[in-house]
Image (cartoon, rainbow, N blue to C red):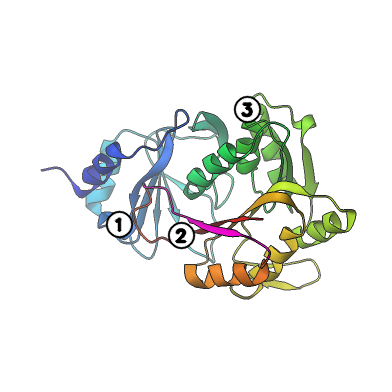
Amino acid sequence: MPSRFDAALRRRESFHLSPAGPTDARRLIDGEGDGLPGIELETFADHWLVSTRDVRISAEMAGWLRDSGRSIYHKRLDQHQKESPAHFAGPMVEAPFLIHENGLLFEISFQSGYSQGIFLDQRDNRLALRQRLGSGKTLLNTFAYTGAFSVAAAAAGAITTTLDLSQPYLDWARRNLEHNSFDPSEHFFCKGDTFHWLRRFAKQGRSFDAIVLDPPTFSRDKDGKVFRVETDYGQLAALAARCLAPGGVLLASTNCRQLSEPAFLRALRDAIPQAHRFTAAPMPPDFTGESYLKSVWVEL
């Protein structure tokens, strides 16, 4: 009899996850959405990452993972311990490697800490941004991490500005552009606080055709000021809207589980009253469990 794990993989065979080119990174098991609460399994170019939240990997699942013959790494979803995944079974993966997403290449690392280089739940939003932009358009990618949205925009011919606090992540973003034969020198990179740069851009009168705004749920700046998505997202969105060009679009996104989608929409409507359209975007179909990611396209 096929296992619950095989059933989850087969279920995804019918999902159309690659409308714009090859995709070999996706979620294979998504917790309660596949009848396996507390367990997530993702594939990155056939290297598997199993993540657990408050549960242990059962003997049944451990045997199934080992029998796959793949490189298996394990990550504990713990807000207090941000460790790199640990090797669990199969061949070791000791160097960064590339995955495909809708025909684009992204660098992944199992040795880089808690996150591996890309957030798979934003796959459809990256494709939608790519389809919305065109040659010569401009993108501001805030809280950019490794610049995946910047790569998607560059694929459409847009000129990107990639903004993050971390120099190593900005360097990673440059490599992601290079992996896709885009010249980083034709794009812009800003290191620092998003609030600071948005105020600076607004003061300079600099505007962008698209802005991606996906902040961490909680952060603290160098002066000790705390940012919480539940209370402060509206202020951030209003500031970003000041930097949008006429007819521009803002992708407002958060994975804060304490903030409901209706509350998130209300915060955006209050913060950007001049917008004429707010369109909520669903998560990719391989994410069958909790719809924790709230994404709204705000159009001026």
The answer to whether residue 278 is magenta is yes
State which tag comes first along the sequence, 3 or 1. 1
Answer whether residue 229 is visible to the viewer in this image. Answer: no
Bounds of the magenta span?
A: 274-285
Dot 1 corresponds to which residue? 33
Give the number of the mark in front: 3 or 2: 3
Tell me where residue 157 sits by quadrant.
top right
Give the number of the mark in front: 1 or 2: 1
User: What SS does tag 2 mark?
Assistant: loop
- Viewer-proximal residue among 184 and 161: 161
The disc at residue 77 is: 2
Quadrant including the C terminus:
bottom right
What amino acid type should be assigned to the residue bearing mark 1? Gly
State which tag comes first along the sequence, 3 or 2. 2
What amino acid type should be assigned to the residue bearing mark 3? His
Dot 3 corresponds to which residue? 179
The disc at residue 100 is: none
Residue farthest toward the bottom in the current orientation of the protein = 231
User: What SS does tag 1 mark?
Assistant: helix
Q: Is residue 19 left or right of residue 66?
A: right
Q: Residues within 10 Å of mark 3 (few under 14, many from 20)?
A: some
Q: In this view, does 87 lie to the left or right of 222?
A: left
- Viewer-proximal residue among 50 and 18: 18
